[in-house]
Amino acid sequence: MSIKDDLEREEVREPLMDKKNLSDEQGGSFVQSRSKESAWMVYLSTFVAVCGSFAFGSCAGYSSPTENAIRDDLSLSLAEYSVFGSILTFGAMIGAITSGPIADLIGRKGALRVAASFCVAGWLAIYFAQGVLALDLGRLATGYGMGIFSYVVPVFIAEISPKNLRGALTTTNQLMICGGVSVAFIIGTVLTWRALALTGIVPYGWQREDVKKSFKQLYKSFVARKADISQEATEIKEYIETLEQLPKARFVELFQRRYLRSIGVGLMVFQQFGGINGVCFYVSNIFESAGFSPSLGTIIYAILQVVVTALNTTVIDKAGRKPLLLVSASGLVLGCIITGISFYLKVNELAIKSVPALTLTGILLYIGSFSAGMGAVPWVIMSEIFPINIKGVAGSLATLVNWFGAWAISYTYNYLMSWSSYGTFILYAAINALAIVFVVTVVPETKGRTLEQIQAAINA
């Protein structure tokens, strides 16, 4: 079920104006008025959707500031708390597997409601938990909701956005995730762990029934036959009607030759296996081991990623997707090399006084570079390049790979650091260098193209 189905499910009772009965001047004013109204409805609908992204970030950021308090209150061992922290990614993987089919079956809006329901139930389970079982079940439920949000939100935004705003609006998904993580870090220092769990429910207040008005307006603006419809909207409508005649794709069909170039799995692989979750989850330990203040380093880190991600929303539709990915991956390579050098100097007791400054420089360059492209752009491209008849299955696969990578990197990071601290970052640098080759040779530029034009270019 596509966004068109979501919109057509909402009954439109108000009579629509017929532009044919208007004078040229009246018609122009009517079109301009409809255009402004449509834009505001897109912004409102995007805001409602990215509330799910903020909730996503809240889930991801919850475990770090609450570890000591939860372990003390519920008498958890380190192993039990580790299960609590990591089970989030397993829930997200399950959510990723089911996200596409759910979105196709009950629509994007319905999938957002399913995700919100699981997250609310999970937060309440955590709040009322008196033992490890309820705690883990709650964490699993919030992870499941995150898995659905991570696929549906960027896809939904891409499908309702005009081509000149699609990149910026879709990038707000990553911005809100970063915002959710940062807010959880900050308020988690002053609230109890139970109170912090209740704050996780707040973003879902915007996904209530009263947002139906925005969907009705989207319907009238982009789908209704009697309303003034732009050429782009007409192309989208015809394209959707054609694709809906095609059979739904099965998983094995994703590997047919005509789909190979359109699969976004590669970007998700490089996004995660470039080391982001190892750095993100253990950034305090990295600064501490390098002799730099972990609290100050973490604060700078959190602020930088939000600022750079916000700036990214202003340039993605001007600079293009590929240039941002290439600049980002290049910065990641350099950041990993600088960090690796700092650990090499520390291990070999060379220029010890320079280690803290080098580590700070390398890590900040790394997170700044990631936020500039590899953080948000893979999700933007994933939402753009899949044909509608395979979007559900392909999007689920890409999201599953992303969450598997998140788990794999966070799980192996400490083992790799025990093997070789500087070798770990050199390994991440090599993977990010391969990402540059992948982007240059495989990834298409989608800036300024309609979804239909993107498909035509890929399948040419």
Image (cartoon, helix red, strand yellow):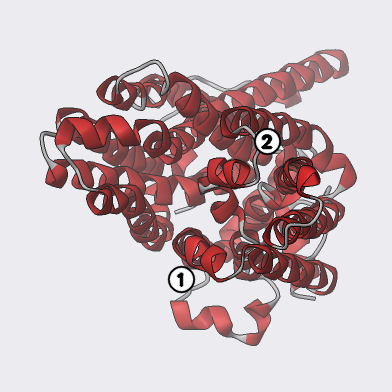
Residue 324 located left or right of residue 112: right
Q: Is residue 452 above or below residue 127?
A: below
Residue 350, percent across and down?
Answer: 79, 57
Q: Mark 1 points at which residue?
A: 248
Q: Quadrant of the C terminus?
A: bottom right
Tell me which amino acid carries mark 2: Gln
**Picture disc at residue 217:** none
* Foreground disc of the pair 2, 1: 2
Which structural element holds mark 1?
loop
- Which residue lies most toward the left here? 130
Q: Which of pointers 2 and 1 lies earlier in the amino acid sequence?
A: 1
Tell me which amino acid carries mark 1: Lys
Of residues 285 and 250, the one nearer the viewer is: 285
State which quadrant residue 241 falls in. Answer: bottom right
Q: Quadrant of the N terminus?
A: bottom left
Q: Name the residue under label 2.
A: 305
Question: Dot 1, crowdedness within 10 Å: few (<14), some or many (≥20)?
Answer: some
Question: Dot 2, crowdedness within 10 Å: few (<14), some or many (≥20)?
Answer: many
Q: In this view, does 215 lie above or below 119?
A: above
Of residues 192 and 242, the one nearer the viewer is: 192
Of residues 202 and 168, the one nearer the viewer is: 202
Residue 436, percent across and down?
Answer: 81, 67
Spatial CA span between label 2 and label 1: 39 Å
Residue 138 located left or right of residue 292: left
Residue 247 in view, yes or no: yes
Residue 396, percent across and down?
Answer: 46, 62
Which structural element holds mark 2?
helix
Residue 369, percent across and down?
Answer: 77, 47
Of residues 173 and 42, the one nearer the viewer is: 173
Residue 338 located left or right of residue 392: right
Q: Which residue is drawn at 34% across and 48% down?
A: 85
